[in-house]
């Protein structure tokens, strides 16, 4: 007779142990915090080092003038002699820049600006293409693109200035 109550007690104990007595809200809260592993953080890829032959050294304390190319459908060549600012105001212009510029500002659409080097660029238009071949004082340029469809690429010196170059670098 003692066996029947013992079996009954064991059956009831197994049933109670197998039941989840938490409320539905508690179950959902626990499911939020369990079961999903934390993703591992991958390191940010390091940028390739800058080749010393692609560096133009400039006295950044020098304040230059503002060079302006205004109007549409222009084709001009300009030179940043003393760390000047360049402003391109218009649409569909092609501007070739020799020397290192402090700042390039493009206000317009579908312009093509080929520069040797610049420190900062602000693009306030769409469909503009900017290429540069060298880095000012070994630093990558700061790019502020305020519209869509613009491209800023690193190119070889020959592609930008039209002069032959021994260096061919990837874009």
Image (cartoon, rainbow, N blue to C red):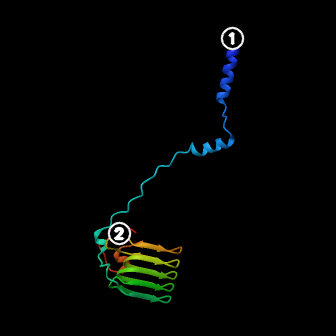
Q: Which residue is mark 1?
A: 2
Q: State which tag comes first along the sequence, 2 or 1.
A: 1
Q: Nearer the viewer, residue 64 or 80?
A: 64
Q: Does residue 81 appear to the left or right of 20 in the view shown?
A: left
From the image, which quarter does the C terminus lie in? bottom left
Residue under label 2, please give it: 169
- At horizontal 40% and vertical 58% (from top left) the residue drawn is 45
Dot 2 surroundings within 10 Å: few (below 14), some, or many (20 or more)? few
Label 1: state its secondary structure. loop
Tell me which residue sits at (66%, 24%) in the image: 13
Q: Residue 168, position in %: x, y?
A: 33, 70
- Inter-mark Cα distance, 2 to 1: 90 Å
Side (left or right) of 60 relative to 122: left
Residue 136 against residue 32 in the figure, above or below = below
- Residue 19 appears at what percent x and percent y? 67, 31
Q: 60 or 121, which lies in front?
A: 60
**Residue displayed at 29% across by 76% down:** 57
């Amino acid at each position: 007779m003692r066996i029947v109550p013992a079996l009954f007690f064991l059956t009831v104990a197994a049933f109670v142990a197998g039941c989840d007595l938490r409320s539905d809200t508690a179950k959902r809260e626990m499911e939020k915090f369990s079961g999903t592993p934390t993703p591992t953080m991958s390191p940010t890829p390091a940028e390739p080092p800058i080749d010393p032959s692609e560096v133009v050294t400039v006295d950044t304390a020098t304040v230059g003038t503002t060079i302006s190319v205004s109007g549409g459908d222009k084709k001009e060549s300009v030179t940043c002699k003393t760390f000047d600012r360049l402003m391109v105001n218009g649409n569909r212009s092609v501007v070739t820049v020799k020397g290192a510029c402090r700042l390039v500002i493009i206000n317009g659409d579908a312009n093509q600006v080929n520069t040797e080097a610049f420190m900062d660029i602000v693009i306030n238009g769409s469909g503009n293409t900017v290429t540069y071949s060298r880095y000012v004082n070994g630093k990558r340029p700061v790019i502020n693109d305020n519209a869509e469809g613009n491209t800023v690429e690193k190119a070889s010196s020959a592609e930008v200035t039209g002069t032959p170059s021994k260096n061919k670098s990837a874009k």
